[in-house]
Image (tube, rainbow, N blue to C red):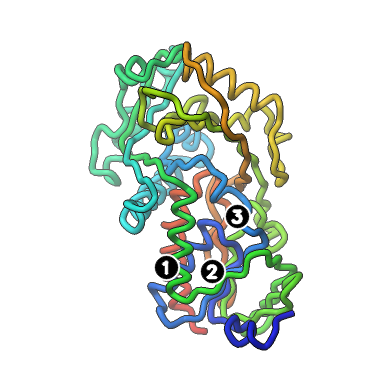
Amino acid sequence: MLSYWEQDIFKPKYDYLIVGAGFSGLWMAYFLKKQKPKAAIAILERGTLPNGASTKNAGFACFGSPSELLENVKEIGWDKTLEMTQKRFEGIQIIQQHFGELIDYNACGASELFTERNIFEENLSQLELLNKNLSAMLLNQNHFYEDTKIISESKFEGFQYAISNAAEASIHSGKLFYNLYKTLVGQDVKFFFGTEVENIDTSHKTAIIKTKNLGDFEAQHVCICTNAFSNLFLTAQNIKPGRGQVLITKPIKNLPFNKTFHFDKGYFYFKNVGDRVLFGGGRNLDFEGENTAEFGTTEMIIKKLKQHLSDYILPNTDYEIDHIWSGIMAFNESKTPFSEIIQPNLSASVCMNGMGVALAPYLARELAWEMGKVEK
């Protein structure tokens, strides 16, 4: 229940109400404010910080490694794969353009690493076709290339082959969240953390949003941006959560690389954070167990991360693990996000399939433009 003072400042009636304060929700408010500077906008978030993956991810603005893209081609075809790749590419540019200097943005590119020659050669044989199909989007005929130096320069062991690209970037996820938050507060966007939405009624022109602790809100338009936790509101989308486990080391002197890396079709990923190494993944070791919305870590996956860290990434190097955590991503069978206007007073931008850092700004910009044209 709100007091008179609270109601006077935090009025429960808004033009746009966004459910979820992760990257999808923050970028949505950011671009709605650009479309409609005078619009009254509020964001409801059930956690004290965003739940899910936005501030719990590994800080990769992912473009996609060759094996990931080629796997996508098998699953959803060339057209859809190229469409999703272009959206990620443009999303990365949006991040750099709007917040690059504030979030440790590093246009470092990425390398996919291989231990087995046959798998490497299978991917290498497809590079010409992959580059050709990407060239119209990137204006670069040789986007992916065999990298014969990165493994020795980085002092890795066990990895034998590498394919690199220049499109991927590394960011500080916490700084991106905080700078989006500060910008939106400065634009008079209201935030309600610790506020869980129980029901959204869009049967009338004005939507009614029932919350567990602050009563009802009203909005001319509601946008659901809850990603992995969207099944309560979007049951037909059949969105499944997927947990990602991450660790980071204490500082290591003379770390020999400054880049993002992937292996095993992108299921494992690591990079430097200054003079630390961040390493995450392993969901493919136990898909069923990691298909969960529960935060936490498992001994099997953390053990494998530590083993790979010692054997492949930091061989003959003394290091200590500083922190371990997990984030919750969202996946569906189509391997594509759901971002559209559902009805005049309801929209959603969810299910980023592990690529939310890069996809969220692009999808928010496009959907905010469409929402701004909807007659309220």
Q: Are marks 3 and 1 in contact (CB under 8 Å)?
A: no
Residue indicated by mark 2: 341
Which quarter of the figure has residue 46?
A: bottom right
Disc nearest the viewer among 2 and 1: 1
> Which numbered disc flags the more N-terminal residue, 3 or 2?
3
**Quadrant in which the N terminus is drawn:** bottom right
Image x and y of residue 203, in percent: 69, 80
Looking at the image, is mark 2 or mark 1 earlier in the sequence? Answer: 1
Q: Are marks 2 and 1 in contact (CB under 8 Å)?
A: no
The residue drawn where x is 47% and y is 18% is 314
Question: Please, is residue 360 above or below residue 81 in the view?
Answer: below
The amino acid at mark 1 is: Phe
Q: Is residue 108 left or right of residue 46?
A: left
Which of the two residues, 240 or 23, is positioned nearer the viewer here?
23
The crowd level at tag 2 (other Cα within 10 Å; few <14, some 14-19, many 20+) is some
Q: Nearer the viewer, residue 363 or 307?
A: 307
Q: Which residue is at the front of the view, 195 or 203?
A: 195
What residue appears at the point 53 percent right and 81 percent down from the top-left corner? 15
Kindly report the distance in space between the C-alpha atoms of the residues bearing marks 2 and 1: 15 Å
Q: Position of residue 225 (x, y in %)?
A: 58, 61
Residue 298 visible in the picture: yes
Element carrying mark 1: helix
Image location (x, y in percent) of residue 165: 33, 33
Distance CA(mark 3)–CA(mark 2): 15 Å
Inspect the image, locate mark 3, and give the three-letter code of the amino acid beneath it: Asn
Q: What is the CA distance from the residue labelled 3 to the residue labelled 1?
A: 18 Å
* Badge number at residue 227: 3
Q: Identify the residue shown where x is 68% and y is 64%.
A: 194
Check whether the beta carbons of the residues at disc 3 and disc 2 lie within 8 A of each other.
no
Compared to 349, does 201 lie above or below? below
- Residue that mark 1 sits on: 31
Decide if residue 125 is in sight here.
no
